[in-house]
Amino acid sequence: MSTLTATAVTDLPARAAVANAVYVFDNNFECSDTAPDAGSEATPYCTLPAALASSSVVSGTTIMITGNVSGAIDITKSDITIEGRGTRVVGGAYGISLVGRHHVTLNGVGYQYQTGEALRIDSSTDITVNSFGAARSQDGSTTPDPAMPAISVTGSTRVTLSDGVLQANPGPGVLVQQSSQVVVSDTIVNGSTGGIALADSTGVDVVSDTIDENCGAGISVLGASTDVDIADNIVSNALACGATLGTALTVDTTAAPPTVDANILTTAAGTDAVSWQGRTFADGPALDAAGDGAHDLTVDPGFAIQVPAGSAHRSGWDLAPGSPAIDSADSGAPNMPARDRDGAVRTDDLAVADTGTGPIAYADRGAVELARQATPTLTVTATAGRTPSDYRTVSVAVQGDGGSWWPIVSYNVDFGDGTKSGTRPYPEAGTAPSHTYGADKTYNGTVTVTDAHGRVFTTPFTVTLAKRVFSPSLEVDQSGPSLGDVTALIQTTNEDDPYLGSYAIDFGDHTPTVTWTSGGVLVPTDTLRHTYAASGTYTVTLSATDNLGWPTAQPVVQKFTVTLPVPYQPPTPIPTTVHRIGGTDRYATARLVSQAQWKAGTASAVVLARGDQAPDALSGVPLAAHVHGPLLLTSPGSLDAATRAEIDRVTGGPSTSKTVYILGGASAIAPGIEDSLRKAGYQVVRYEGTDRYRTSLAVAGAFGSTAHVIVATGLDFPDALAAGPLGAVENAPIILSKGDALDPAVTPFVRSHQDIDPVGGAAQRAVAKISTTGRTVSHSLAGATRYDTAAAVANAVMRIAGHTTFAIGVASGKAFPDALTGGAYAANAGMPLLITDPAVLSSAVRGVLIEEYSTLRSVTLFGGNQAVSDGVEATIANEISAKIQ
């Protein structure tokens, strides 16, 4: 008896009127073993043991399992069905164990990689296992037990194992012991140590199984087994493994031997096929001759797939046509299944004589029925003519493949209009039958074939007849050197007839119609050129036929407008001008610069700097562009009336929405000036520091967070003023250096920027003295002289602005005031500012002007002739062929 111990479980409630379903899916992200709706399809259980332990599983429940589950599962409830959906029980000391259960069905569950048995059935009744598989039991064992089966049935009654595949198991595929009323059918056992073993059991039917390439006995009946039927099996290539002999059938019983009928019994080495109660028989017929069997064979079973070279096992067990297993089984054997393991019904192979016994004389032996096609494969091709003269003539070609199952010998075509071809032989050496129909419409015909057995099969075909219409496309486009030149592209659009036959095209301008024929050449497209003599809208008309003779239903028409050009008149060139903005003094010049750029009320703000010294004002040039306003100058102690009037004009008058930015402390611009502006109604913001460097840092704060910062020396004005427009296009502040060193107060601010642009040699040296790791430092903004530096900055401004340069500003390189207000003008205008020697045009300035000559339209000089002399003005005008205004 089995050593398994039954687990005590509570009796289940009575079977419900309608069986319910419980779901298990351990790979579902929504699964839960504890949720209130656990076991529903929306929230399946994660594990089968959790489902079995739940109150959801009652008598009559079907447990639906999706995916793989872990092994060592004890079925703790009876009267249930477990339905696998691609399910494998993987690993564990065993796969599934049923001990003391009744009325349990396992459908579609496979097992693999257990260290012990795949499936245990012990002390149970009414157990059904369908569509199962087991592979590699005792996985990982260094000394596998050849007596341990993949599936064991012990001490159980009414057990059915059907439609299984057992492969690569080191022990028997199935072991039935101390059990009764057991059926093993439609099951394949391959590559195991023994196929199906019975011991001390009664009422066992081993029927319609395929047991192939196994060690030891394919089927063994041992001990006190009785009332055993072994029928319709294929036991092939039984192998001798070590001391274990390879036999197809071994019987060693103390009771009545089994009934053996209609088996194929072979061994791999051609040794004795049967060991029977101490005797051996070379083959099945010898066993039958001794009166111990009937209708048994020892032959090659005729599998369609052979064992590949280098492999121990085959990959499929379908029968090949002509196999001795075909139509030779005993269909009356106890529990002979009506279908094979794949669900195929028993099918008569008419090419094979029916030698079977029982009610169905054509059933096949083994687990797989040779199921051929139920009808022949017929292909009927109805082909109509293609030209206007033969399109109603249709030929009907028949291609059939019935093989030995449907040996076609003749056919008859019904063309669907009352005409028939008559009986014609198949296959037919001559041409296919044809027929000419009398009208254009759809005809439904049939082809009837007859095979050598007198069976008839009919397949329909349909043919639709209609005149064809040629539909070429016409595309007229302008081409050639003259606007009157056009190209007419004519091409086919019908894929069935992709060639032109002929055409006539009228271009609609009273020139002769152009005609063309293909002359039998296959031409899918043609191009025709034409020249119109006058402007106008023309109607181009195409009539054509395809290469088969089918015409267009109506002409293809395209309207095309031709506009011949008017003789070219070159545009009047726009002259380049040089003009000067200069006043009687620096304050007047600042006002004139503001008036030249800003209409009344258009400025958002004004930047106000002292006019007698440069330092505090140097960082104000990009600030003016940033706040959208001019830069005006004042004396430190008082604001003259003209400058105050310009502040009111350019801003539109005092308002809390208008701001005056004052550069420098009280010594630079007196507090009284600030108070008067504030009392007038302006917002006033003063940027100041203890020195010019900290003042530049204060001004920089107005810009907020920026990617760039500009550094220029604060000991002189030219580099900082030239950098003003660069600050405008980069939206960057200017920080002043102490010559070739940075004030400690401004160094952290400079280093906080990703891009540092030092302008001039002194600033370059100052930046080089601080750590700029991880920063981008420009090294291209310095020259040998202040004029070269300004030219380098001007080129950078034009490059960053990214548009054509139409205007450039020029200011003195030796006096700061006019250059200061001119720098603000240039910054607001987005144009570069060059500085020059007041008396002689600097070569660096000349180089930039000549480089931009082709697009330059305006040069603005800032200051009177003391700032930039009339001679320099004349030289600039001469270099760029400009007019002085």
Image (cartoon, grey):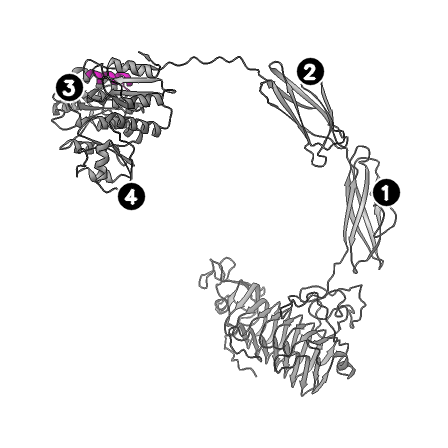
- For the record, the magenta segment spans 587-601
Q: Which residue is mark 1?
A: 418
Where 674 falls versus 747 (above or below)? above
Query: In the rendered structure, which disc, 3 or 1, sits on the residue that comes first in sequence?
Result: 1
Residue 817: % across, % down: 20, 21
Is residue 598 visible in the rendered structure shown here?
Answer: no
Is residue 564 visible in the rendered structure shown here?
Answer: yes
Q: CA distance from mark 4 to mark 2?
A: 76 Å
Q: Are marks 3 and 1 in contact (CB under 8 Å)?
A: no
Q: Callout 1, which amino acid?
A: Gly
**Crowding at mark 1 (Cα within 10 Å: few <14, some 14-19, many 20+):** few
Q: Which residue is mark 2?
A: 511
Query: In the rendered structure, which disc, 4 or 3, sits on the residue that comes first in sequence?
Result: 3
Query: Of the residues tagged 1 and 2, which is closer to the observer?
Result: 2
Query: Of the residues tagged 2 and 3, which is closer to the observer?
Result: 2
Query: Of the residues tagged 4 and 2, which is closer to the observer?
Result: 4
Q: Using the image as rendered, state which of residue 370 and residue 301 is in the foreground.
A: 301
Q: Callout 3, which amino acid?
A: Leu
Q: Which residue is mark 4?
A: 774
Query: In the rendered structure, which disc, 1 or 2, sits on the residue that comes first in sequence?
Result: 1
Q: Is residue 574 left or right of residue 863?
A: right
